[in-house]
Amino acid sequence: MPFPTLQTWFAKTPSVAPPRKDRSEIRVGIPRVLNVWSTHQFWVGFLRDLGIGHENIVFSSDTSEEQGRDFGKGRGTVDCCYPVKSISGHYGELIFGQKKKIDILLSPMIYSMPSVLRGHVMDTLTCTRVMAGPDNIKAGFLKERDIFAENGIVYTAPFVCLGDREAVAAQLHGTMKDILDLSPDETERAVKAGYHALDTMDAKLRQRSREILTWCARENKPCIFVVARPYHMDPGIGHEIEGDLQAQGFPVLWMQYFPTDPDLLNWLFEEDLREKRIKSPFDISDVWSSSYSSNTNEIMWGAKVAARCPWTTCVLRLSSYECGMDQPTYTPTQRIVEATGTLFFKFGDLDSTKPAGSVKIRVETITHYMSKYSQDIIARKKAMLSPNCPLLA
Ligand code: SF4
């Protein structure tokens, strides 16, 4: 039998962690597109933990027509929805539009999303156009010659299942180990830091939403509930329609950051749970059986929440031009929302140009309907719930 002393000794974790590699001068550019809108804190936390300086993590600006014209023109490879098409402008801005050049262009191919609905739905996958988007757009920068290499930039598009936390470290290490000289241990630690940053931001925003709802409940005031995909927060994609309504004095909540506290959700879904129509407040099987797509699932869940919450008297539904994923959700979301008399307004087929005239008219219409009917809607929806509202406890 071998004497175990040496094995035991060498298996010990060193008491002092190896010194961190100096990556403080590396500049990383990330296109501010698609699901980066809801996962950016993961990427910031991940890169910061690897030693990349805060000032060296560069996001492209919001989408705009000028950005597409100046940096993306002629680089389109696929004719598809605007949120994907617009990525060319973001890549171009990161390559050609920086005062201080970036070294790495990081454009993650996100396969699945972290979601509050995970475990209650079939899966939390991203849209196939989202998954393939980075490689489609990259082709437009390689078709004549390698624009990345020409500008001294390393392009990386790690395939990553952000919905599966255990898989992420190996995926990122596999793709980025040579680019950033990563060890498996430090990748794992950085992934943990990334999730910590993401979870912290999500919790903070949900808490803020709860404060807004509490104010609405105390003052008996209405608010607007936005049902949309994360990138509709981009002023160049969603066109700040919710901002125009906020300027009329209505608070705005985004479904992505609705509070998920058990006291509130159990109150809103009390009857559904008692009648066993659903197993949990996050269960959407009563309205959507093919629950594979993360953002689509959340849209259906958001419609259910908005229909039940008394103070969300109006739902603003945003979707983009040529969105195949949204087509089947239009009728169900409208039916769910309107079933409780909640107002529903859809801005579909949003493209590069803000339809300013029609938005102005519709904002006036929404303001009129909200001002006239909100108090009735609040009273009717409150009557459907138990009087023990946790927001007023
Ligand atoms: S969800 Fe729709 S708009 Fe978004 S990337 Fe997919 S097809 Fe395009």
Image (spheres, rainbow, N blue to C red):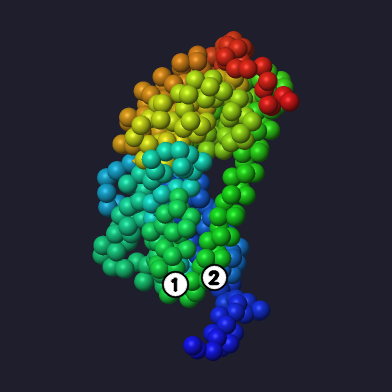
Q: Left or right: 175 with respect to 305? A: left
- Mark 2 residue type: Glu
Of the two numbered discs 2 and 1 in the rendering, the one whose residue sits closer to the viewer: 2
Residue at screen point 55% across, 64% down: 190
Q: Left or right: 30 with respect to 288? A: right
Q: Relative to 203, does residue 239 appear above or below in the rendering?
A: above
In the image shown, does 186 or 104 lie closer to the viewer? Answer: 186
The answer to which image quadrant residue 379 occupies is: top right
Is the CB of the residue bearing disc 2 within 8 angstroms of ligand 1? Answer: no
Q: Are marks 2 and 1 in contact (CB under 8 Å)?
A: no
Q: Position of residue 382 (x, y in %)?
A: 61, 15
Label 2 sits on residue: 186
Residue at screen point 60% across, 17% down: 385
Q: Position of residue 179 (x, y in %)?
A: 44, 73
Q: Position of residue 378 (x, y in %)?
A: 60, 15
Q: Relative to 266, does residue 74 appear above or below in the rendering?
A: below
Residue at screen point 61% across, 21% down: 311
User: The C terminus lies in which quarter of the figure?
Assistant: top right
Judged from the image, the secondary structure of the residue bearing numbered disc 2 is helix
In the image shown, does 99 or 258 lie closer to the viewer? Answer: 258
Mark count: 2
- Mark 1 residue type: Lys
Dot 1 surroundings within 10 Å: few (below 14), some, or many (20 or more)? some
In the image shown, does 273 or 196 lie closer to the viewer? Answer: 273
User: Disc 2 and disc 1: Cα gap in Å?
Assistant: 10 Å
User: What is the residue that sits farthest to the front in this orientation?
Assistant: 1
Q: Which mark is residue 177?
A: 1
Res 244 visible: no
Judged from the image, the secondary structure of the residue bearing numbered disc 1 is helix
Q: Left or right: 264 with respect to 181? A: right
